[in-house]
Image (tube, helix red, strand yellow):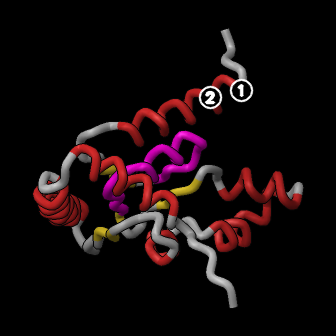
Amino acid sequence: MEQKKEDNGEAIASSMLGLAKLKVPVIAIVIGEGSSGGALALGVGNKVFMLENAIYSILSPEGYASILWKDSSRTKEAAEKMKLTAEDLYELKVIDKIIKEPKGDMEESFIKTTKSLKKEIVSAIEELNNMTPEDLVEDRYQKFRHMGEFKAL
């Protein structure tokens, strides 16, 4: 049986609400391509880390171009407007840290990247474990409220 789009939206909202209310630390890590409505829930974490070459958005650039311009060939233009890179999202306060991905041998790069991730996760857990359950919930709320904050000229 095919699930209706309304059900998907409700499931996403329910997931976000559930994460927001958790009284334990929530750490999210974007490691590849997060481009669906479900990606919204990752933003509710106390800490959100992202590999430098990953992308994070609620829609793929192809989908964005198809909806906005009715032309999926404008994918590159769409990707630039969407601000889905780690650098863009760090600047918009959607993510807390960019994890560098070393160049070179794939196996060696993987090992270095996982070591960097482990270091950041351990550090985040140590920091977040000092917060009360109520403070963790409030921290997530405040963080989510200030993402992409508008500044008047």
Element on which disc 1 rests: helix
Name the residue that disc number 1 marks: 6
Magenta stretch containing residue 39, yes or no?
yes
Is residue 20 toward the left or the right of residue 46 in the image?
Answer: right
Check the image and name the residue furthest to the right: 70
Across and down, in percent, residue 127 comes to 15, 61
Is residue 69 toward the left or the right of residue 134 in the image?
Answer: right
The quadrant of the picture occupied by the C terminus is bottom right
Q: Magenta residues, as a range?
A: 33-50
Element on which disc 2 rests: helix
Depth check: give the residue in front, 136 or 118.
136
> What separation in Å lies between label 2 and label 1 (alpha carbons)?
6 Å
Residue 77 in sight here: yes
Label at residue 43: none
Name the residue that disc number 2 marks: 10
Which quadrant would residue 105 be assigned to in this image?
A: bottom left
Across and down, in percent, residue 145 comes to 51, 60
Name which residue lies at 71% across and 21% down.
4
Name which residue lies at 56% across and 65% down.
84
Q: Is residue 132 above or below residue 73?
A: above
Query: What amino acid does circle 1 point to?
Result: Glu
Query: What amino acid does circle 2 point to?
Result: Glu
Depth check: give the residue in front, 15 or 38.
15
Q: Is residue 86 above or below residue 4?
A: below
Residue 31 in sight here: no
Crowd tier of the residue under label 2, counting other residues whose Cα lies within 10 Å: few below 14, some 14–19, many 20 or above: few
Depth check: give the residue in front, 87 or 53.
87
